[in-house]
């Protein structure tokens, strides 16, 4: 997996997490007690406990549990990807500036650069750029 793919996956998971949180918020607004209407004051007892019982029953829905589980899963996966990206960037910092640029242009930058473009930008030959990138990929997998 490249850094670009990992960044895309983090963005996709963050988008999915936001959707799940909005779904949970929508479910909570359907379940939670609404505001009270003060112009009709009733003295009948037991209505509040009925609302609380309904809330407790609805909270136990399988959908609610499944939503919480999926939210936690998404948060953990985002954390794992972010840790992986941090470790990869730490490995990348072990190289000098030109090697960092070669790897940046090949993996991280959103434009698809050819080896000729990369060699022109870093002022190294194409074969040297390939060698630098190959050495980075080999060290990274250890």
Image (tube, grey):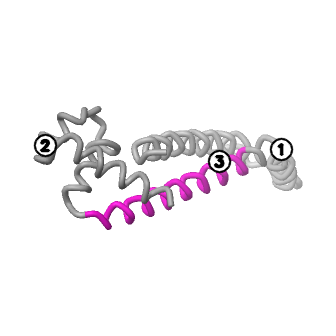
Magenta segment, prevailing SS (helix, strand or loop) = helix
Q: Nearer the viewer, residue 78 or 97?
A: 97
Instruction: Report the residue at 50% width, 42% height from top.
Output: 9
Of mark 2 and mark 1, the one earlier in the sequence is 1
* Residue 64 location, quadrant: top right
Left or right: 28, with 138 as reference point: right
Please tell me whether mark 2 sits on a helix, a strand or a loop: helix
Q: Which residue is mark 1?
A: 61
Of mark 2 and mark 3, the one earlier in the sequence is 3
Horizontal and vertical percent for residue 125? 16, 43
Distance from label 3 to label 1 (Cα)? 23 Å
Horizontal and vertical percent for residue 5? 45, 41
Distance from label 2 to label 1 (Cα)? 58 Å
Tell me if mark 1 has few (under 14), some (14-19) or many (20+) residues whose alpha carbon lies within 10 angstroms of its own: few
Residue 138 visible (yes or no): yes
Discs 2/3, front: 2
Horizontal and vertical percent for residue 104? 28, 48
Please tell me whether mark 1 sits on a helix, a strand or a loop: loop
Tell me if mark 3 has few (under 14), some (14-19) or many (20+) residues whose alpha carbon lies within 10 angstroms of its own: few
Discs 3/1, front: 1
Magenta segment boundaries in residue numbering: 67-95
* 114 is higher (above) or lower (below) than 88: above
Please tell me whether mark 3 sits on a helix, a strand or a loop: loop
Distance from label 2 to label 3 (Cα)? 63 Å
Q: Which residue is mark 2?
A: 121
Discs 2/1, front: 2
Is 49 a magenta residue? no
Residue 35 is labelled as 3
């Amino acid at each position: 997996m490249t850094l670009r793919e990992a960044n895309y996956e983090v963005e996709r998971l963050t988008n999915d997490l936001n959707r799940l949180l909005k779904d949970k918020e929508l479910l909570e607004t359907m379940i939670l007690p609404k505001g009270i209407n003060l112009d009709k004051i009733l003295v009948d007892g037991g209505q509040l406990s009925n609302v609380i019982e309904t809330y407790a029953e609805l909270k136990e829905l399988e959908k609610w549990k499944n939503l919480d589980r999926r939210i936690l899963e998404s948060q953990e996966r985002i954390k794992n990807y972010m840790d992986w990206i941090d470790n990869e960037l730490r490995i990348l910092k072990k190289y000098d500036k030109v090697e960092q640029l070669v790897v940046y242009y090949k993996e991280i930058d959103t434009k698809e650069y050819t080896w000729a473009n990369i060699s022109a930008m870093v002022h190294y030959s194409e074969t040297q750029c390939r060698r630098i990138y190959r050495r980075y990929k080999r060290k990274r997998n250890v």
